[in-house]
Image (cartoon, grey):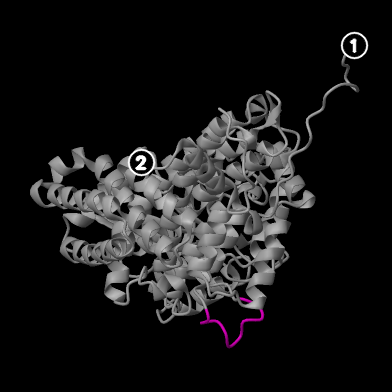
Amino acid sequence: MKASSSTEGFFQVQPSIQPQIQEDAVLRRIVSLHLPSPLPPSLEKDLTRFSSLVISKPVLDFAAEAERNQPYLKPLSTFGIENKQDPLVTGEGWRALQDINIREGLVGLAPEPGLTGHGTQWNTRVSKGIKSHLWTPSSAMVTCPGSMTDGAAKLLSRHLDSENGRIFAEALKRLTSRDPSIAWTSGQWMTERSGGSDVRGTETVARKLTPKEMEEDDGVDSEGMPLGPWRLDGFKWFSSATDANMSIMLAKTGEHSISAFYAPLRRQVKGKDPRESELNGVRIQRLKNKFGTKALPTAELEIKGMRGYLVGKEGQGVKEISTILNITRTGNCIASVSYWGRSLAICRAYSKVRVTSGRLLQDTPSYVRTLARDHVKYAASMHLTFFIVALLGVSEGSSSSSCMASQTNILPRDNNHTLALLRLLTPMAKARTALRAIKGVRASMENLGGIGYLENEDPILNISRIFRDTCVLSIWEGTTEVMADDLMRVVKGSKGPDCLDALDKWVAHGLRVARTHSFTDEVIVLQQLWAEFLSYVRTKDREELNLYGRKCLKDLERLVCGCLLIIDASRDGDGVAKEIARRWILRDAISPTSWTDEVGWDSRIVYGDSARPRDARL
């Protein structure tokens, strides 16, 4: 008998994380549903390349470096003068990951190289969403400013014919550029000390300068474009894109009037080299010390004399900013399933090399059953997320005619129904995917035992960091309570009847498909869910309905995901997809099959149809 030592004895075999585009059966199912089949060669090549890139050593080293060398401030010069030139310092890893995000063109309006003349072959929102799904867990959260950049680009693109169109066009060119040397990122500054999603307490004030004031301060931004005619003053409590090049923000233009503004972050210094610039009336008061997203510089900002341009009409700020919120909330959904998907991929890889009680974890039915339950929920959240992504793309004019989602009528043919479903379901999807991902990633930590709890030296295995970053997703872009309130606002508002009618027609289609393909018990459950949801929203007033907001979110999620899973399973009769739909809708209802058959289904759900038969011992 020989004693172990630091160099001798048992050492765990390193789990091998494979590119998810090949290994994640749920993701492959999403690809085949929402993108053309077979994939166009250029798209298949790009997704395959990127899926390997995001788990490559250089990228993971950048992520680890960004976490290790976190942003910090140098607010004053040696002699105590305010540092307006470069008060924020970010790490090399963060900057490198930002460059990758830009080069990959993940902003919705960014051009797709090599697709000239073929841009309408598929829904580019979906293809970019799949890339974001692969990328987010490796990105150190550069996808956060990336999502806000995406929203800002969409907002400015709607105002190119306005009096400020030339200014907005220049910003848009940079927001959608794939060249890191000229590309911009954008912030979205809404949150103040009085609240985040409730902007009625906004204390930032905008005042239009007089011609004389404009003449006295006729400065230009860092790119030589004239500074805007509005002066903004106030304080922003949370800014999660502090190193951005511009921002879209809300400010009061009257006692009860909130407007949206575009403002560059930097301006040229008068009398100095044009290449020198300073902050445009912004002072970073302090960086936030957060539980997660450590590499992302989040700050409190004092705004004093910031120059900007009005976006849209005065008093329409909330309406304008909603364009960004639709995109950032969709991005939040993608981030949720992305972190969850990566953590499950780590669990699958670990189960193939970890031996306990003389057998691999993947051959331990109780362990695989636990994973299977999470994979069913992950599949539901993935289908919900990419349904929202696809609706967003269609609402923007992308084509989905060549994909199965369109051919099976998962996507409505009526554009008004598309817009109604997008408005109704986005807050629900944002809330429920975030909560499920937080719970799911925590479970993945446990599935790895002590290794899951460590801040691992191997970035690819660091589920602890993934968990910390995932936790913010139930807060960013509106908490669960805010999303429930938003859902109630829709169903009880002027557009409520149209939204409910669109969903009623969509659910009816899902139930017809379910009946045709013998989902008998499932139809009964879904009908009851829909009837109960309608009863709640039609018989209760707004105040009472808010008490049941979270219940309505849950019921709507179960209903919509159930329909999505049934339609997906019915398109090709896939056995695993059918079993996932059954388990999601009927939950833990006893299966008529034997327990050994159940174990077999567990394995196929987790590892795909390629899973080899297991020695079904408990």
Give percent across and percent down for residue 183: 64, 67
Quadrant for the N terminus in the image: top right
Camera-side residue of 228 and 593? 593
Amino acid type assigned to the residue bearing label 2 in the image:
Arg
Camera-side residue of 316 and 500? 500
What residue sits 35% from the left and 64% below the top? 320
Amino acid type assigned to the residue bearing label 1 in the image:
Met
Camera-side residue of 318 and 106? 106
Horizontal arrangement in the rendering, residue 320 relative to residue 281 (left or right): left
Question: For mark 1, what is the residue?
Answer: 1
Instruction: Judge the density around disc 1: few (<14), some (14-19), many (≥20) Cα neighbours within 10 Å.
Output: few
What residue sits 48% from the left and 68% below the top? 34
**Which span is picked out in magenta?**
112-121
Tell me the SS state at disc 1. Answer: loop
Question: For mark 2, what is the residue?
Answer: 587
Tell me the SS state at disc 2. Answer: loop
Horizontal arrangement in the rendering, residue 554 relative to residue 46 (left or right): left
Is residue 452 visible in this depiction of the protein?
Answer: yes
Horizontal arrangement in the rendering, residue 494 relative to residue 343 (left or right): left
Residue that protrudes farthest toward the bottom in the picture: 117
